Amino acid sequence: MTVLEDVQSFLVTISPAAACDDCIADKLGLTVRQHANHKTRELEYKPGFVRRKDICSICSGDKKVIRYVV
């Protein structure tokens, strides 16, 4: 699987919860947070994905998060 597929799969699994780039990077074992950021910016333009400032369901931080909504 590619990193993009891993991020997408993770978000579908935790749906409808939202996650920030830091938590996505941590949960998927990515060494660089920017890698998660790059992939979430790609996903925000795909159907079903919403990226905006909100509360992360994992760390409770008020920051940019992404979620998958059906």
Image (cartoon, grey):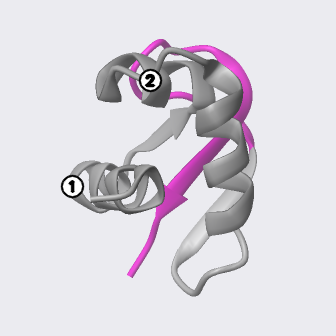
**Residue at the spot of label 1:** 13
x and y percentages locating residue 70 in the rendered image: 38, 82
Residue beneath the point at 62% across and 52% down? 39
Query: In terms of image quadrants, where is residue 44?
Result: bottom right
Disc nearest the viewer among 2 and 1: 2
Name above or below for residue 20 compared with residue 50: above
> Which residue range is magenta in the image?
53-70
The three-letter amino acid code for the residue at tag 2 is Leu
26 or 55, which lies in front? 26
Helix, strand or loop under label 1: helix
Who's the residue at 56% across and 70% down the image? 49
Residue 30's label in the rendered image is: 2
Label 1 near label 2: C-beta < 8 Å?
no
At a point 26% along the width and 48% down the height, the residue shown is 14
Q: Where is residue 36 in the image (x, y as percent from the top left)?
A: 59, 36
Disc 1 crowd, CA 10 A, few/some/many (<14, 14-19, 20+): few
